[in-house]
Image: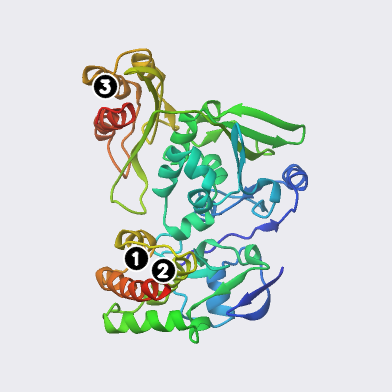
Amino acid sequence: MRVNFTLNGNRVEVDVEPNEILLDTLRLRLGVKSVKRGCERGECGVCTVLVNGKPAVSCLLLTVQIDGSEIITVEGLYSDDLFRELVEEFSKNFAVQCGYCTPAMLLTTYAFLNKAIRKLLKPTKEDVIKAIEGNLCRCGTYPRVIRAVMEVLERRISDCG
Amino acid sequence: MYYKLPTVDYYRPKTLDEAIKLLREVENSKVIAGGTDLLVDMKTSRVRVRALVDISSISELLGVEDLSETIRIGAATKLQELIESRAVSQSLPLLKAAVESMGSLQIRNMATIGGNLCNASPAADTAPPLLAYDAELVIAGSEGLRTIPSTKFFVGYRKTALNSREILKEILIRKSEWSGWSYIKLGRRNGFTLSVVAIAVLAKVVDNVVYDVRIALNSVAPTPIRVYRAEEVIRGRRVNWGLIEEAAKTVASEVTPIDDVRSTSWYRREMSYRLAIDALARALGVA
């Protein structure tokens, strides 16, 4: 089946069998290697992508289901100011150990921050913890991830006034 | 592990009528909405199907609507949309609390309320609130629509009142003034977890007398259940700790839990009793 969608702002057309999952389309057909293979049953979150701006796991999405959607991975966010700021804080706070969960962790926290800033919300540390429930990190970097997100949040929300 | 999904046909109808026609005409076809349960079941060969009928873009099945007396929830509405809906926050706080405890953000962005009900897991977390609200379910089939009470929807372990050619269209919940509610979910960990036991309570207390009460649980029987005998113990009585204790004991005697990977029958019964005490105390306003 022919499927059209945008990947990081570029229009893409693929011809796939209905049983192909988005994770495989991204990694094997389109060479997007930041999207990792993990549990393949929606529990670990390393295959997270943004579908129309919202985090979703690409292991439980058929590629045919995303026809007409906008898919974003970290590759598409290099020039985004908020994303660069978040990466900078991840780096400063050593919120990375082995790095396997990192692209997905960045996408989830980016979507969280984006929404908070856009809707002028004032999320708490508990909200950040809740937001990353679906991103497992077996190195245990959670406290550092939370710190990194809180630092961006505090700066951005006070900037917003 | 490297799962491979079996070969399958895929249809994405634009209308409910088209979807029902497909279910009738395509042999061994099954509805897919969010896919967060179904695709896992297909990967692990628990479910085998020839064709998938994707109902996630049928507009008749989407969204929450406030119809003044009633809240209407389309079956293919995503769980995260329920949490963010003003109508749900204002009129159905018990449902909101239950949905917030479900899955992860990624899963809630994909999974639907209808999928959670139709998958009919004994641990379905949208079920206890809907059973407590006495929600009505509108089912679409080739002969048109029929409406059944949610309390008649779960007919056995992973079995619903739907036949294989019907689709759950929407959930209707009549608005009502409750003086208190509570929802407690016990899992193996705090976040992103399946229920070991969950309990939902709605109560209407006037001048310290219980005018109405509804109690529903999941993971303690082959289906999510209401515990009518415990409700009967409380209804019409004055609120005090003795009454709560008596009702909680009745809850524990009404559940029929099993041993499985997440817990034991003994523990589930014990926790049904203890959670019932906490949940009733909160909902009846004595905590």
B95 in relation to B225, above or below? below
Secondary structure under the numbered disc 1 in the rendered image:
loop
* Residue nearer the viewer, A104 or A62: A104
What residue do we see at 77% from left, 32% from top? B143
Name the chain letter of the residue that bears numbered label 3.
B
Name the chain letter of the residue that bears numbered label 1.
A
Q: Residues within 10 Å of mark 2 (few under 14, many from 20)?
A: some
Q: Which residue is mark 1?
A: A136
Residue A38's tag is 2
Secondary structure under the numbered disc 2 in the rendered image:
loop
Q: Residues within 10 Å of mark 3 (few under 14, many from 20)?
A: many
A44 in relation to B64, above or below? below
Secondary structure under the numbered disc 3 in the rendered image:
helix
Q: Is residue B221 left or right of residue A64?
A: left
Q: Specify which label sits upstream in the sequence, 2 or 1.
A: 2
Q: Is residue B211 visible?
A: yes
A49 in relation to B239, above or below? below
Q: How is the image coloured?
A: rainbow
Residue A33's tag is none
What residue do we see at 32% from left, 80% from top? A90
Front of the two marks 3 and 2: 3
Residue B239 position within the rendered picture, expressed as x and y whole percent measured from the top left: 28, 18
Disc 3 to disc 2, C-alpha distance: 46 Å
Farthest top residue in view:
B236
Residue B71 position within the rendered picture, expressed as x and y whole percent measured from the top left: 58, 37
Q: Which residue is mark 3?
A: B244
Looking at the rendered structure, the kind of residue marked 2 is Gly
Q: Is residue B37 visible?
A: no
* Residue contact at pointers 3 and 1, CB within 8 angstroms: no
The quarter of the image holding the N terminus of chain B is: bottom left
